[in-house]
Image (cartoon, coloured by chain):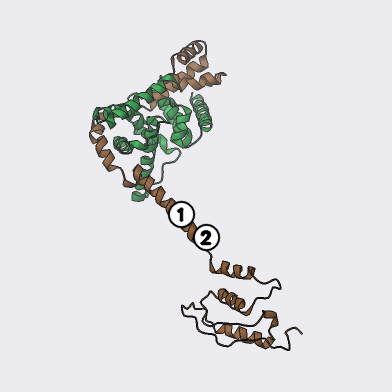
Chain colours: A brown, B green
Amino acid sequence: VTMRDCPDGALRDLLPLYVSGQLGDADHARVEAHVQGCADCTAEIELLRATVRAFEVKPIDAATISAKLPTARSARRARPFHSQPLWRVAAVITFMIAGTATMMVVRQPSAGSLMLDTLATLPADGRPTPAETTIAANTLSGQHATSTISFGNNLSDLTDAQLEALLASLDRMDGTVSADPVALVTPIVPEASGRRNQ
Amino acid sequence: VSPEINDDRAVDTALIKRWKEGDQLAATMIVERHATALARFAASSGVRERIDELVQDTFVRAFNSIDSFRADSALRTWLFTILKRLILDRRRAEKRQSGMVELEEGHAVQAYSALDSIVADETAMRVRNAVGTLSPMQREVFLLRVTDGMAYSEIAKVVGSTEGACRVHYHNAMRSIKEMLSDDA
């Protein structure tokens, strides 16, 4: 025997609720009226009732369970501290304060931005004064170089030999950050004659 | 939502309020209203032993965290979700202890034999076997709909799916069961 589906899908959808007594009066009456003349729905209702029987279980002893339940007062005490509303509000406020403080620290001028500021104030001819160049070089070396390098106008004014001397000075820096910058080792002054690339 | 379902919610809400005010009898009434449905859900999920213990743990956990219950779903739906987590926890613990394989499709048929059914007529037995062949999702949706008369929206919250998907699972399950019973006849 093949069990068929009733073509009224909306009504079929109500059948489980009809069997479990969950329907309102109007829907209940509607299903009852339909089932009178529908063999498919009648068979489906029998199937649903058989399902309910198939999965019946022994009644649970409510009194035994109730005896183990907390009282409202003890449940309140047992609630974890982190789930209490006041603690949550305090956590959110602390988080916002910490976030704002972090943003303020991050936005303060850093060594890199100091160098950029210095370069941005160069004269119109683009050539920094010796003092400015020294500041920029110090900034590049993290403001804590173990030796100070200075030269006249700009790198293009140096000869190859002077550049090599400059690089050698840089090589002597071991990269270790020192809190005590050492005084100038050797000032390098560009020669009047013999420009590089000439 | 039918008026009866709304009434159910109103009753549960009133009982919770009474319990919060110190009426312990209200807790007993809540247990009486939902304990059997929880036991049935556990049994149909393949739990074979200590079902009453699981039901009890569900209520203890629920009452200890009743403030986190949102009235936008039925209390029974919320209890089912707690029970489901407890079932999973127990399975994981059992798996760790004895290297047990997790309950999968097909195992449910054996699991149902542990049910202490009051009525074990032939049709019910055949239906039980047919339900046992469904996928775990189809089985959960089908049984929540049929044995508890839950709305699809509430079933969706229990099984972690959508209302539309649950509707499809239900009708597919019903079709499969009908086919199986037709083949048997």
Which of A184 and B14 lies nearest the eye of the viewer? A184
Residue A80 found in image quarter: top left
Looking at marks 2 and 1 on the same chain, the residue that comes earlier in the sequence is marked by 1
Along the viewing direction, whichever of B185 and A184 lies nearer the viewer: A184
Q: Could you tell me which quadrant the C terminus of chain A lies in? A: bottom right
| Whole-number angstrom distance, CA of label 2 to CA of label 1 | 12 Å
Please give the chain letter of the residue carrying mark 2. Answer: A
> What is the chain letter for disc 1?
A
Residue beneath disc 2: A107
**Residue A89, relative to residue A184: is it above or below?**
above
Q: Nearer the viewer, mark 2 or mark 1?
A: 2
Q: Is residue B47 visible?
A: no
Q: Residues within 10 Å of mark 1 (few under 14, many from 20)?
A: few
Residue B142, compared with residue A141, is above or below; it is above
Q: Residue at x 69, y 86 (%)?
A: A159
Viewer can see residue B114: yes
Specify the amino acid type for callout 2: Arg
Q: Give the left or right position of residue B63, taking residue A195 as reference.
A: left
Q: Label 1: which residue?
A: A99
Q: Amino acid at mark 1?
A: Gly
Circle 2 — which element? loop
Whether B130 is drawn above or below A117: the answer is above
Question: Residue, x 50% and y 29% (percent of image)?
Answer: B170
- Residue B112, percent from left and from top: 38, 33
Q: Residue furthest right?
A: A198
Residue B93 position in % (x across, y down): 35, 47
